[in-house]
Image (tube, rainbow, N blue to C red):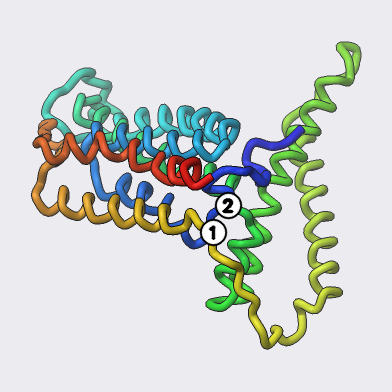
């Protein structure tokens, strides 16, 4: 069984792209999620990330990220509704608590929680697509000239986290196949076995790295990887998305405020930007098809 976030080589544009171009491409949509609070812009940005994941063939990674983000989003909305005692539109007047005082739930707090949940869902989905589609070895080579040890650590994390997810899936399936007469396996037992296996794998990885010379001096030469023909398309999309985002922010074409009352402004430029985001996400795959 292949874990959803495990990297698998794919014959797609994102799978062939260099790590730097893929990082710039997905980072542009993540930056839009952090720069804007308007729900329509965030919804369009989420569709763009989904389009990027579907064209990259990372369907299972997107599904897993959406499930996790949905649970986390519900918790964020509920937490913000209770913790943020702001907003003029009171929906539920809560009880008077000794320390917290009167706990009221406002429509503005719910809306702000929804914005935060949508933002974090976009970020989680983008990182899931990056983990499943971009070769971690290329990430290591990209960061190697800047920080060799940090690049090695980051690449090991990218590799070992999906392996831990695959181990958890295998342990869970094995526990389910023991039969109805077997004693149920608790979550703490699964966690202990998962942690023990991860520690064993970490020790083996450290020994293998030491035998391969990573503990000594770094090599003097660096072999560059040839650029993918579709890298230019990813760079162009990242530049266009970033430029349009700056223009929309500067003109205030998509403004949004949750407190004290929900207020939003959406001009034609903001609408055009929202419609362009999903289309721009699919441009590299179209360029790859026409090239072939």
Q: Is residue 116 left or right of residue 212?
A: left
Q: Are marks 1 and 2 in contact (CB under 8 Å)?
A: yes
Q: Would residue 290 be seen by someone viewing this image from the given angle?
A: yes
**Where does the image place residue 13, in percent across and percent down from the top left?**
52, 46
| Label number found at residue 228 | 1
- Which quarter of the rendered picture does the C terminus lie within? top right
Q: Report the front residue among 126 and 109.
A: 126
Q: Report the front residue among 74 and 274.
A: 274
- Residue at 58% from the left image edge and 46% from the top image edge: 133
Residues packed near mark 1 inside 10 Å, few (<14), some (14 to 19) or many (20 plus): some
Q: From what the image shows, is residue 285 above or below residue 179?
A: below
Q: Is residue 153 left or right of residue 107?
A: right
- Identify the residue position indicated by label 2 in the image: 16
Residues packed near mark 2 inside 10 Å, few (<14), some (14 to 19) or many (20 plus): many
Res 5 → quadrant: top right
- Which quarter of the rendered picture does the N terminus lie within? top right
Q: Earlier in the sequence, mark 1 or mark 2?
A: 2
Mark 1 vs mark 2, CA separation in Å: 6 Å
Could you tell me which secondary element the residue under label 1 belongs to?
Answer: loop
- Residue at 81% from the left image edge and 41% from the top image edge: 193
Q: From what the image shows, is residue 28 above or below residue 20?
A: above
Res 272 → quadrant: top left
- Residue at 17% from the left image edge and 34% from the top image edge: 271
Q: From what the image shows, is residue 40 above or below residue 212?
A: above
Q: Report the front residue among 292 and 211.
A: 292
Q: Would residue 98 be seen by someone viewing this image from the given angle?
A: no
- Residue at 53% from the left image edge and 77% from the top image edge: 146
**Where does the image place residue 258, in percent across and percent down from the top left?**
17, 35
Q: Is residue 249 left or right of residue 105?
A: left
Could you tell me which secondary element the residue under label 2 belongs to?
Answer: helix
**Where does the image place residue 35, in percent across and percent down from the top left?**
26, 50
| Label number found at residue 104 | none
């Amino acid at each position: 069984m292949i874990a959803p976030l495990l990297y698998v080589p794919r014959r797609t544009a994102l799978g062939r792209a260099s790590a730097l171009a893929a990082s710039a491409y997905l980072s542009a949509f993540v930056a839009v999620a952090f720069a804007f609070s308007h729900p329509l812009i965030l919804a369009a940005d989420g569709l763009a990330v989904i389009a990027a994941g579907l064209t990259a063939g990372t369907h299972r990674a997107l599904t897993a990220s959406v499930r996790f983000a949905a649970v986390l989003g519900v918790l964020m909305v509920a937490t913000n509704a209770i913790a943020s005692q702001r907003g003029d539109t009171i929906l539920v007047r809560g009880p008077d608590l000794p320390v917290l005082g009167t706990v009221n739930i406002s429509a503005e707090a719910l809306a702000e929680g929804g914005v935060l949940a949508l933002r974090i869902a976009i970020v989680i989905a983008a990182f899931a697509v990056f983990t499943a589609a971009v070769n971690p070895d290329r990430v290591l080579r990209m960061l190697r000239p800047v920080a060799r040890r940090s690049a090695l650590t980051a690449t090991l994390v990218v590799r070992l986290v999906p392996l831990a997810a695959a181990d958890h899936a295998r342990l869970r399936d094995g526990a389910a196949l023991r039969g109805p007469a077997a004693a149920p396996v608790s979550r703490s037992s699964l966690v202990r076995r998962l942690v023990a296996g991860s520690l064993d794998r970490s020790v083996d990885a450290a020994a293998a790295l030491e035998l391969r010379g990573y503990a000594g001096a770094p090599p003097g030469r660096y072999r560059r990887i040839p650029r993918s023909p579709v890298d230019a398309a990813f760079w162009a999309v990242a530049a266009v998305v970033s430029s349009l985002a700056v223009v929309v922010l500067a003109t205030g074409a998509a403004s949004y405020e949750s407190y004290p009352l929900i207020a939003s402004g959406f001009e034609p430029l903001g609408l055009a930007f929202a419609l362009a985001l999903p289309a721009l996400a699919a441009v590299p795959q179209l360029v790859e098809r026409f090239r072939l």
